Amino acid sequence: RSIQTNCNASGSINSGFSPSKTFTTLARLENGVTTNNNSFNVYPNPASDQATIVFSSDKEEAYTIHLIDITGRVVFDCNEPSVIGDNQFQLNLSELTKGIYIVILQNRDTLLQSKIVVQ
């Protein structure tokens, strides 16, 4: 894949395309569902005070949840154990500023992400 940087809002000034690079990701996230048989969802979306993170795991292992604001700052971070099967985590959003955040769910093998809007 090639990338290009737009240097202004209209996209009329840009860096040109980079040389092509090939890379592999561990999982693909599409509409909250990954193609590697793990499911991952954050609801309700948009949310106000609380959101629920649900995912499936095929093994017991540690996982990390990161919540990142649009500036890239980590506003929430925790480590939890997963169980085989369905897992659920309640995310308290009551102290957050309204805006768009990225929820990242990560274990040793997989990194999944989803956008959430806090109203």
Image: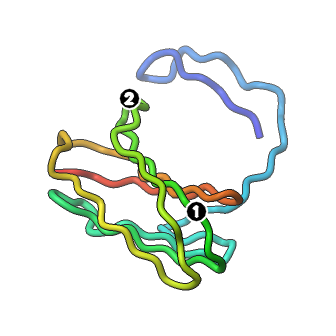
Q: Nearer the viewer, mark 1 or mark 2?
A: 1
As drawn, the label of residue 93 is: none
Q: Position of residue 52 (x, y in %)?
A: 31, 69
**In the picture provided, is 16 more to the left or to the right than 39?**
right
Quarter of the image that includes the N terminus: top right
| Residue at the spot 24% in from the left edge and 60% down from the top edge | 46
The number of numbered discs placed on residues in the rendered structure image is: 2
Structural crowding at the residue carrying mark 1, measured as other residues with C-alpha within 10 Å and reported as few (<14), some (14–19) or many (≥20): few
Q: Residue at x 15, y 58 (%)?
A: 49
Question: Which residue is disc 2 drawn over?
Answer: 71
Q: Which residue corresponds to mark 1?
A: 62
Residue 70 position, x and y percent, is 37, 35
- The kind of secondary structure element at disc 2 is loop
The picture places residue 2, in percent across and down from the top left corner, at 75, 34
Q: Position of residue 50 (x, y in %)?
A: 21, 62
Q: Nearer the viewer, residue 108 or 116?
A: 108
Which of the two residues, 92 or 111, is positioned nearer the viewer here?
92
The quadrant where residue 48 appears: bottom left
Q: Residue at x 39, y 31 (%)?
A: 73
Q: Which of disc 2 and disc 1 is earlier in sequence?
A: 1
Q: Secondary structure at mark 1?
A: strand
Q: Amino acid at mark 2?
A: Thr
In this view, 63 is above or below 34? above
Q: Is residue 15 placed above or below 116 in the rendered structure?
A: above
Answer left or right for 7 relative to 67: right
Disc 1 to disc 2: CB gap under 8 Å: no
